[in-house]
Amino acid sequence: MTGESLRALAGQPVIVGGGLAGVMTALMLEGPCVLLSAGPLAAARPAMASSMLAQGGIAAAVGADDTPALHAADTLAAGAGLCDPAIVDRVTADGPDAIARLSAFGVHFDRAADGTLKLGLEAAHCRHRIVHARGDASGAAIMEALVARVRATPRITVLENACVQALLIHDGAVTGLRASVMGRDITWPAPAVVLATGGIGGLFGDTTNPLGSCGQGLALAARAGAVLGNLEFVQFHPTALAARHVAGPMPLISEAVRGEGAVLVDENGDRFTEELAARDIVSRAVWRHMRAGHHVFLDARQVLGARFATRFPAIDALCRAQGIDPARQPIPVRPAAHYHMGGVVVDGRGRTGVPGLWACGEVSCTGLHGANRLASNSLLEAVSFGTWVARDLSGLSLARTAPPGEDGIAPPLTPAPSEALRRVMARGAGVVRTHDELHETLWRFASRMEHDDAALVAAMVVLAAQQRRESRGGHFRADFPQTAHDAVPSRLTLGAVRDAIAPIMAQAGKMTLSPDNGVIA
């Protein structure tokens, strides 16, 4: 794309992110927009967006024995006191309509012979309400249909291989962005920017997320002056495939397998936890059992056996690629970073506190998930808030900004987190945390955060975890294992992080560490 053609797009809303939240926002907008994707916008490249990796499906109260009120109650219970009840009610009420909108865009959900939707059961749900597509390949099926619709919509301009480096601010409002698009550095005016950049799993040593999911949107928003909330709450999925040879995200063994009756056992065949408890509870049980010297397996032989490949064809293929036949062998599993409940604080329209900036999907903190996301609520949130952001933007009079000047020289791109950074983050801010581990982890990232977005996001997550002196939902402190009586959400700004880290940096200047304990290179 030439500089002239890029300039012609000035004045259109820009959506940053090619996952479900981003494409849903683009499709629901009434006018022209620009969709930036960090890589190829195609389901054939699943490592580019977590949405494409989703297995279970979308939670929605569409069963004859279900209601949005029951769905809301389950969501509130999982959120451990930090959900916004009004947002929970609104999103769960939107569930059936969200399924209808996706169907209208060409998503073919799995149905019984009589045409009714097939519904799965997942942990902490009181009803079968997980709407799925192509068995356990729901994310890929949904994204294939939506990407095809995006490609067929002329008003949506898709720019691939685009990396946003900074948001442009004037008088406290976002007025555009600086980006590298297809290798070309540009400064780009825009009347509205929507962040739909995903989560932070790539900061951790074991993750089910694409390794590029390192909180880029959080860093952009923080540096632009936005408020970030509940950053300490990271959901670790208890059953990632403990694969031997996998480059990239760890394969996920969907919670739906446990919903079918599969059990968690150790090398002796002994069960040690309730499989359908909330994810944080199961993850800690697996973590502790492994710390005690055991190996952990998910055993579906008795409940599924030869039917495993039919019910879960994608998972069956993942297992067989590792030499495991789940019909005859238990599947080795371990916890992995999976979903971030925290994010950029937004209201019910997806607006941040910075004029001109919206956020939706995993990068946002809407109040739906609280301290622990209920299984399969993430895709629902992306569809619902993508829709509501689009409606908000469509109802505004977005004045065209002046065309950009000469293409600017953007700062160097922040490299992907090193393996050393990911190991440190997993050790210091993983399933179970302590003050000393958090303090050392924060020290390691503090000196790098001004010029390294991954280090900034890691420091913010660790600081929020250090400041929460209790255990709640996805955040567990071994030194503060009790849950406080009052549930108080956390809030951070870049200024607050700098103030909190200043004494740590002053202390660091007086310390001498061995190479093994030094700052990550």
Image (tube, grey):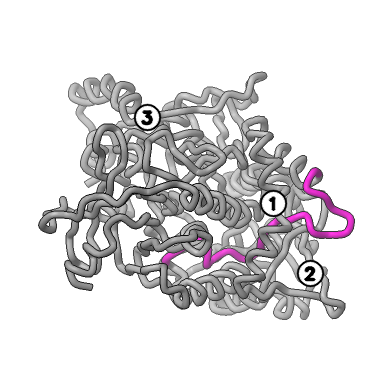
Which residue in the protein does label 1 denote? 94
User: Residue visible at 67% across and 35% down?
Assistant: 86
User: Residue visible at 71% across and 37% down?
Assistant: 76
* Alpha-carbon span between mark 3 and mark 1: 31 Å
The quadrant of the image that shows the N terminus is bottom left
Please state which amino acid type lies under the numbered disc 3: Thr
Circle 1 SS class = helix
Asked if the residue at tag 2 contacts the one at tag 3, i.e. Cβ–Cβ closer than 8 Å, the answer is no
Q: Which segment is the magenta one?
A: 48-69
- Within 10 Å of disc 3 (Cα), the crowding (few <14, some 14-19, many 20+) is some
Circle 2 SS class = loop
* Picture coordinates of residue 291, whole percent (x, y): 57, 45
- The quadrant holding residue 453 is top left
User: Residue visible at 23% across and 37% down?
Assistant: 450
* Picture coordinates of residue 189, whole percent (x, y): 25, 51
Residue situated in front as seen by the camera: 252 or 113:
113
- Within 10 Å of disc 2 (Cα), the crowding (few <14, some 14-19, many 20+) is some
Closer to the chain start, of discs 2 and 1, is 1
Which residue in the protein does label 2 denote? 117
Residue situated in front as seen by the camera: 187 or 362:
187
Residue situated in front as seen by the camera: 70 or 202:
70
Please state which amino acid type lies under the numbered disc 1: Asp
